[in-house]
Amino acid sequence: MKTKTSITLSTPLLVKIDKRIGKRGSRSAYIEMVLREHFRDSSRRAMQMRDRELIDAAADRLNEEAEDVLRYQAPYL
C-alpha cells in the first residue's frame, strides 16, 4: 500500500535526483528505493556491530583456544 505524502527538499538536491533518474524516472520511486537501501544498510551495520561486540567480548578466550591448538599441532609440523 502506498500513502501520498509531501516532503520539502532543496533545489540542488532535486536537481541531483532528476539527473540520476532521467526524464522518465519517478522521484517517488527513486526516493523510496534510496530510503529502503538506507534502512537495509543501517540494519546490516547494526547487526555487524553487535557481532563485533560479541567477538570482541570473546576474543581472549578464542585466542587462547587458537594458541592451544597451535601448540598441540607444532610437534607434527
Image (cartoon, rainbow, N blue to C red):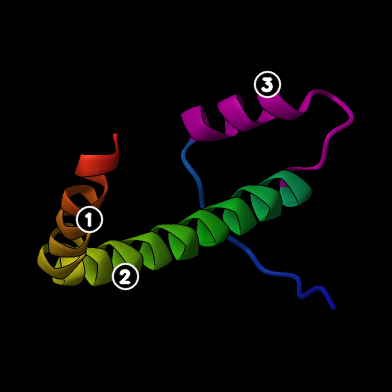
Circle 1 is placed at which residue position?
A: 66
Work out how far the residue at label 3 is from the one at label 2, CA to CA, in angstroms: 38 Å
Q: Is residue 42 left or right of residue 77?
A: right
Quadrant in the picture for the C terminus: top left
Query: Which of the labelled discs sits on residue 50, or is there none?
Result: 2
Q: Going 63% across and 58% down the picture, which residue do you hit? A: 36
Amino acid carrying label 2: it is Arg
Q: Residue furthest front?
A: 76
Secondary structure, mark 3, is helix
The answer to whether marks 1 and 2 mark residues whose Cβ atoms lie closer than 8 Å is no
Q: From this view, report whether residue 52 is shown above or below residue 9.
A: below
In this view, the mark in front (1 or 2): 1
Q: Is 50 or 37 nearer to us in this picture?
A: 50
Q: Is residue 33 left or right of residue 42?
A: right
Query: Which of the labelled discs sits on residue 36, or is there none?
Result: none
In this view, the mark in front (3 or 2): 2
Q: Which comes sooner in the sequence, label 1 or label 3?
A: 3
Magenta-tinted stretch: 11-27
Quadrant in the picture for the N terminus: bottom right
Q: Which comes sooner in the sequence, label 1 or label 2?
A: 2
Amino acid carrying label 1: it is Ala
The answer to whether marks 1 and 3 mark residues whose Cβ atoms lie closer than 8 Å is no
Work out how far the residue at label 1 is from the one at label 2, CA to CA, in angstroms: 23 Å
Q: From this view, report whether residue 41 is shown above or below residue 25.
A: below
- Tell me where residue 21 appears, x and y as whole percent: 75, 29
Secondary structure, mark 1, is helix
Circle 3 is placed at which residue position?
A: 19
Q: Which comes sooner in the sequence, label 3 or label 2?
A: 3
Say few, some or many: other residues with alpha carbon within 10 Å of mark 1 (under 14 / 14 to 19 / 20 or more). few
- Tell me where residue 30 appears, x and y as whole percent: 71, 44
Secondary structure, mark 2, is helix
